[in-house]
Image (spheres, helix red, strand yellow):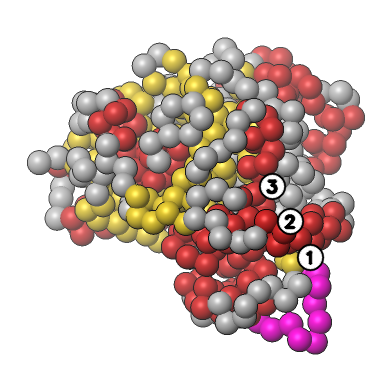
Amino acid sequence: MSFILALDQGTTSSRALIFDRAGAVRAVAQQEFTQIFPRPGWVEHDPTEIWATQSGVLHEALAKAGLAARDIAAIGITNQRETTVLWERATGRPLANAIVWQDRRTAPLCDELRAAGRAPLFAAKTGLVLDPYFSGTKLKWLLDHVPGARDRAARGELAFGTIDTWLVWQLTNGAAHLTDPSNASRTLMFDIHTGEWDDELLGILDIPREVLPRIVPSSGVVAQAAIGGIDVPIAGIAGDQQAALFGQACHVPGLAKNTYGTGCFLLLNTGREAVASTNNLLTTVAWSRDGRLDYALEGSVFIGGAVVQWLRDGLKLVRSAADIEALAASVPDNGGVYLVPAFAGLGAPHWDPYARGAMFGLTRGTTSGHLARAALEAIAFQSADVLAAMERDAGITLTELRVDGGATANNLLMQFQADILGVPVVRPKVLETTALGAGYLAGLAVGYWKDAADVASNWRVDRRFVPAMAGSRVAELRECWEKAVGRAKAWA
């Protein structure tokens, strides 16, 4: 019997999961790694630590399942997107820490590009807004600030990659430098309509083509990983949110999912149509399979579950993230307290890199329970703002929202999300949909699963949360939330 290995490299931890044909988890291993904050608004990771933790959990998961590399039919990779690594081809040594997707250091550069009238061109070709979130300006910053980097890149001595590219390079001992369209579409350098790197955009950002990885399908055997002397096909690659869309069986236009991780990411499958947003959402490649590109509309909330980490690590309100639900449930409502977690600016639909975290409505009667509740409600409010913009763009009204990610275990949050949205929130039995999506893309490429319908049949409902709050109360809460967001904007 063979299995699928999924590597899920996230913002705060590296994970490895082993799936069987039913999509059930046979083993999982996880390891957190260091978050580096050199200056306010800067966020970095050590690429060597990312690889060390990812390699470690890969072998740990195999050991837990009692398996060897020869038992793995294929490897799927999913990753935190936009995080930018630059390294030497000859040695594999990173030239600097990775610049993380949350990093805001290139906000002035984005301002300059907008002032020069470049925003419409980038939007038309990439489906993205000019924001520090994306990889292109991060790569330009590295080339501009690491001594000698630009000249070395032009000579072909350096390699750029998002985290998927970095992992494939390491897994193949430097033999493969590649990425898939779902990750490439998050760089500001990739034309989502042609499926290729774009020379005009590269010229504007002053990035030499020699540094870029080769574009390969999201589902297909693209390289061989060397694990314990055994070659195992790498056959699936997708950015974490696109992988979750696939893992949630949102394979046809009109289906949507929201992932509650470090951030929250709401994606709507739009099929072969790249729907241009008029409501500040992103048009992105969902995946490439069978020689075609599928697209999605996406709304990105930068701080989702990370606000709970902040309550745990920054304010020490709880000992573990799981304790937040009980603390929030200790009060009947938010007591008029609203927390806008704009620690890394605001993403969709606001796109304000200068917004900062703020708390409103505090009184002498405010307790830690109110802060906990306001934090959870902020996650739901932000997602509701994105969904409203998405429905306007796509011209549809969603009938249900499929959810995944660690925070979906929080029943209080999921019920509040359903109440605020006014539609059922559906949580599947297997919450590991990000890793599962990467696993499905890999398994389909090697015939482990027959087709998309085959993998969709594995999807099962765990719980359906039905709206129960009065419409007048929902309107009141959302009005106060909008006021709080307005006051947190343009702070820095």
Q: Secondary structure at mark 2?
A: helix
Residue 204, how many percent across, how many down? 76, 21
Mark 1, mark 3: which one is toward the viewer? 3
| Residue 178 seen in the figure | no
For badge 1, the amino acid type reads: Ala
Q: Quadrant of residue 6?
A: top left
User: What residue is shown at x 14% (from left), y 40% (from top)?
Assistant: 2
Q: Which structural element holds mark 3?
A: helix
Residue 327, given in percent of the width and then of the height, sits at 56, 79
Is residue 362 shown in magenta?
Answer: yes
Q: Give the farthest residue toward the right.
A: 115
Q: What label sits on residue 385 in the rendered view?
A: 3
Image: magenta residue range = 359-368
Relative horizontal placement of residue 42, taking residue 311 as reference (left or right): right
Determine crowd level at label 3: few under 14, some 14-19, many 20+ residues with C-alpha closer than 10 A: some
Instruction: State which quadrant residue 439 falls in.
Output: top left
Q: Quadrant of the C terminus?
A: bottom right
Residue 447: x percent and y percent? 21, 26
Placement of 127 over or under 422, stated as above or below = above
**Which comes sooner in the sequence, label 2 or label 3?**
3
Label 1 or label 2, whichever lies nearer to me, is 2
Look at 56% across and 60% down and name the residue there. Answer: 468
Instruction: Identify the mark nearer the N-term, 1 or 2.
Output: 1
**Residue 358 badge:** 1
Q: Residue at 84% across / 30% down in the picture?
A: 114
Determine which residue is flagged by label 2: 475
Q: Is residue 313 above or below residue 248?
A: below
